[in-house]
Image (cartoon, rainbow, N blue to C red):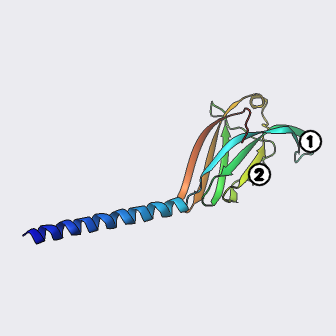
Amino acid sequence: MTEWISTIIALCALGLSSVTAFAQHHNRKKEILAARVTAYFHRTSAFAKIRLPDGTLRQAGYHLVIWNQGPASAEHVEVEVRDPEGVTVTLADCLDGEFPLERLDVSGRYPIPWLPTADMHRGARRFIVVLRWRDGNGRHERVLPIRRGETNF
């Protein structure tokens, strides 16, 4: 009788170990396939001179930077910027067809000069950035409240 109980306990321990090993392997595989896309404002040390498609020369003191912190590449990266009331912010240097980005590799950064086309957004400091991308784990969406200010990244 004692041998049967010992055998059952051993089989239960083996089963639990197998399930734990499978779960760890599955979680590690998901981590390896994941992209971590984020956005932040970067203050330029000097104003960046940007020539718009119509030939106008403008200056940008900030860039909205899209950054993939890895460990996998992000594909079909979409960016949407809104003000706190939900109004879409159009950036002057974003051309039609620029987004979605086909691929943003690990540690890849994509700077967009911060030149809002609407006067109401030029002096504003708070915005909401909606990022959408696809990686080895499927589609993702991230909503980030951001604020213009000094950065030392």
Q: Crowding at label 2, few (<14), some or many (≥20) Cα neighbours within 10 Å?
A: few
Given the image, on which type of amino acid does mark 1 rest?
Answer: Thr
Which residue is depicted at the point 61% across and 56% down?
Answer: 70
Considering the numbered disc 1 on the image, is that residue within a helix, a strand or a loop? loop
In this rendered view, identify the residue nearer to me: 88 or 40. 40
Horizontal and vertical percent position of residue 87: 66, 34
* Left or right placement of residue 132 versus residue 28 in this view: right
Horizontal and vertical percent position of residue 148: 72, 33
Q: State the image quarter where residue 80 is shown.
A: top right
* Left or right placement of residue 7 versus residue 101 in this view: left
Q: State the image quarter where residue 85 is shown.
A: top right
Reply above or below: 65 against 25.
Answer: above
Number of marks present in the image shown: 2
* Left or right placement of residue 15 versus residue 58 in this view: left
Q: State the image quarter where residue 6 is shown.
A: bottom left
Tag shown at residue 4: none
Tag shown at residue 96: 2
Given the image, on which type of amino acid does mark 2 rest?
Answer: Asp
Look at mark 1 in the image and give the residue it sits on: 56
Q: Crowding at label 1, few (<14), some or many (≥20) Cα neighbours within 10 Å?
A: few
Which residue is depicted at the point 81% across and 42% down?
Answer: 92
> From where the camera sits, is residue 137 visible?
no
> From where the camera sits, is residue 18 visible?
yes
Horizontal and vertical percent position of residue 56: 92, 41
In the rendered image, the quadrant that contains the C terminus is top right
Query: Comparing marks 1 and 2, which lies closer to the viewer?
Result: 1
Horizontal and vertical percent position of residue 131: 62, 47
In the rendered image, the quadrant that contains the N terminus is bottom left
In this rendered view, identify the residue nearer to me: 16 or 123. 16
